[in-house]
Amino acid sequence: MISIKAITEFALSFEGAVEQPHFEITSFRVNKKIFASLDIKKKRLCVKLSAIDQSVFCSFDNTIIYPVPNKWGLQGATYIELSKVPVSMCKDALTSSYCLVALKKMRKFLRHSVCRGEPLRAKNLPNWRRVFSREPSRHLSHTRQLKYTNS
């Protein structure tokens, strides 16, 4: 079991992540794209996963982690029951979701660089602050290392 406060703190620990309302629930976004949403009333987290990640997480126990039962579920939207899920598994799913959404822009940049025939060097990569936010210093005051604990 993981608390709402712990989920919120963990989601906001990602670089460039912000919390915003999304209808009656809370969403966590990076680069204006939702990577997770939290329904406090139902104690349920919804994350966006790749098809492979979704099948791996759902194979653990489909009463704890399961696809959203509609077309969104076919596109990777996955529910996590916070009252039943192990903390480390929830954090892993949230991390996978963040990486899927946040790195889309970086992958797009790399694809265009390779197509133009530019060598991939660190100086050619954009600054992460510019990639994730139009206001670079707003969310990136410090960097945290992600540590998982078995709780």
Image (cartoon, rainbow, N blue to C red):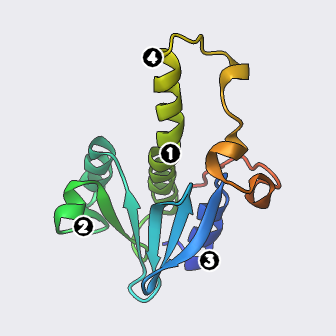
Q: CA distance from mark 3 to mark 4?
A: 44 Å
Q: Which residue is mark 1?
A: 99
- Pick whichever of labels 3 and 4 is earlier in the sequence: 3
Q: Nearer the viewer, residue 4 or 130?
A: 130
Instruction: Identify the amino acid type marked 4.
Output: Cys
Q: Residues within 10 Å of mark 3 (few under 14, many from 20)?
A: few
Task: Say few, some or many: other residues with alpha carbon within 10 Å of mark 1 (under 14 / 14 to 19 / 20 or more).
Answer: some
What is the quadrant of residue 67 in the picture? bottom left
Residue located at (64% from left, 63% from top): 12
Q: Nearer the viewer, mark 4 or mark 1?
A: 4
Q: CA distance from mark 2 to mark 4?
A: 36 Å
How far is the residue under mark 4 from the one under mark 1? Answer: 23 Å
Q: Tell me the quarter of the picture where residue 121 sits.
A: top right
Residue 139 appears at what percent x and percent y? 74, 59
Q: Nearer the viewer, mark 2 or mark 4?
A: 4
Name the residue tied to disc 3: 5
The local crowd at label 4, few if under 14, some if 14 to 19, many if 20 or more residues have their Cα within 10 Å, is: few
Q: Which residue is mark 2?
A: 68
Mark 2 crowd level (few <14, some 14–19, many ≥20, 10 Å Cα):
some
Identify residue type, mark 3: Lys
